[in-house]
Image: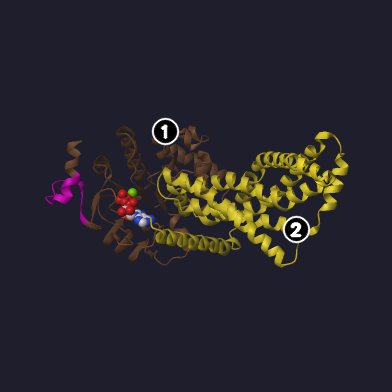
Amino acid sequence: MSNQTRFQAFLSEAGELSRFAARFFAQCFRPRYEVSEFIRQCYIIGYQSLPLVGLTGFIMGLVLTLQLRPSMVDYGVESQLPAIVGIAIVREIGPVITALIFAGKIGSSIGAELGSMKVTEQIDAMEVSGTNPFKYLVVTRVMAAVCMLPILSVLSDAISLYGAYLGVNVRGATSFHLFWVEVIDSLAFNDVLPAFIKTFFFGFAVGIIGCFKGYNSKKGTEGVGHSANSAVVLSSVVIFILDLLAVQITDLLGFN
Amino acid sequence: MTPSESVMKISHLYKSFGNNHVLIDFNFELYKGENVVVLGKSGSGKSVLIKCIIGLLKPDEGTIDVFDQCINDMDDTELDKIRAKVGFLFQSNALYDSMTVRENLEFPLRRHWIEVSQEEVNNMVMEALEDVGLAHTIDMMPIELSGGMRKRIALARTLILKPDIILYDEPTTGLDSITGSEIISLMIEIKKKYNTSSLIISHDMNCVRRASDRVVVLYDGTCYAAGTYAELQHHTDPKVKQFFEQEFKQ
Ligand SMILES: Nc1ncnc2c1ncn2[C@@H]1O[C@H](COP(=O)(O)OP(=O)(O)O)[C@@H](O)[C@H]1O
Ligand SMILES: [Mg+2]
């Protein structure tokens, strides 16, 4: 493929994704609402991701602290460790790592699930069974992703900070209470709110891209694999781009 | 069989995908209580044809009337009313693989008829499963079933709404010939029991011979020849003959 056709393919894909997102907003607020399917998806997307997100969060917090410690000791600011780690986790690492893990787990499973439903005509079967498959499959999953990722990300932050506490405490210096006081003291509203808000966008990106890739899956098992794979790749890249935009916007709004 | 009331009429249907002109001026009429087989090679547009009938694809030109109502410009609510009366058996069965057999069968019921009691639902699910002889699979997942069983469950799901018309997309493709034969027998039984009209898409000559009251040959996107199996069997046109010759080779 020449560069020009590749660029055209990229543009047309971006256009189709935007149309897909527009369709989501158009269908989202119109009845009939698929409440029970939405709740089922929240359980699958949110609750079932918790162990994975918790584990990675814990390790991130612990490892980050252990890695930072030597330099902090060198500079003689070891006492600042809880504050630094707290800010790093809450502002950046917690939301982004959680979103990436979420993209890997949920983006791929949505892509594969909808992809296989598409190629085995299950989506058509829903349509002839008095169901709007876009509402039943896409709207519920995207909404569940938007609602669940922020919650997961807050929980992951908390678990990460506990991991960080263990990291600070390897030499047995700080009490748990003192650690928390230092972390909370170092965090301002401006650190927490933008970080929390961006997770909604991350959730939306993972949900809509997973659904888009699955829903437009090409025939055959190869097509399903491709959908799952490209859902993860694209949503991970989009998470970083959104993160970059988020930092610019909070800067402009003077939230720093 | 005397042709009675018409249940479906397709006039001057055109459908293309880009430069691929799949259906070109296709005309067809289905009468109450008859089984019509549409015979055509793979890729000739048979699936496209029935997907247009059920409103999954929009025709470029031409009209499709089902029960004397034109479905071309219907909105979703109106289409759903028609779809509740037209069953569709998908080539790949399209069983929901995250649901049990019971949930698969309940899905169209609960979706089309919102006010229906649990007891009625249970009875209808059992009746449909008994019609296909698979009542014992009710709590199994589709993945646990054999290909033939899956086809039967898909058929039960199609039957559950007691459709007046059933569209079969290659019901015997991918099954061994014995299982295929069983499915054909089942289709014939169902037609007798419920007096449904069926449009059967196939290139399986066994199915054509046993299940058809009338045969339509789809060739080059149009209705190339039509008649009973016996009439077409001795047709002299090579394009028609090829389907019938192929049977003796097998
Ligand atoms: N959604 C679609 N988009 C583009 N081309 C399609 C689509 N569906 C079917 N076609 C094309 O229409 C032709 C007929 O397909 P189909 O009706 O599935 O054949 P068959 O007679 O084997 O069922 C094929 O050439 C196929 O590539
Ligand atoms: Mg086909």
Q: Quadrant of residue B19?
A: bottom left
A221 up-or-down from B221: above or below:
above
Label 1 crowd (10 A; few <14 / some 14-19 / many >=20): few
Tell me the magenta residue range. Answer: B224-243
Q: Residue A65 appears at what percent x and percent y?
A: 75, 41
Query: Does B12 sit left or right of A72 as displayed?
Result: left
A176 up-or-down from A93: above or below:
above
B119 up-or-down from A138: above or below:
above
Residue behind label 1 places its C-beta within 8 angstroms of ligand 2: no
Identity of the amino acid at label 2?
A: Leu
Judging by the rendered image, the residue that carries numbered circle 1 is B146
State the hue of chain B: brown
SS at mark 1 in the image: loop
Q: Residue A109 appears at what percent x and percent y?
A: 55, 44
* Front position in the image: A67 or B79: A67
Judging by the rendered image, the residue that carries numbered circle 2 is A193
Q: Is residue B133 visible?
A: yes
Q: Quadrant of residue A67?
A: top right
Q: Residue A245 appears at what percent x and percent y?
A: 64, 61
- Image quadrant occupied by the C terminus of chain B: top left
State the hue of chain A: yellow
**Front: mark 2 or 1:** 2
* Front position in the image: A77 or B174: A77
Colour convention of the picture: by chain
Q: Is residue B238 magenta?
A: yes
Q: Chain of mark 1?
A: B
* Front position in the image: A229 or B183: A229
Identity of the amino acid at label 1?
A: Ser
SS at mark 2 in the image: helix
Q: Residue B182 appears at what percent x and percent y?
A: 33, 35
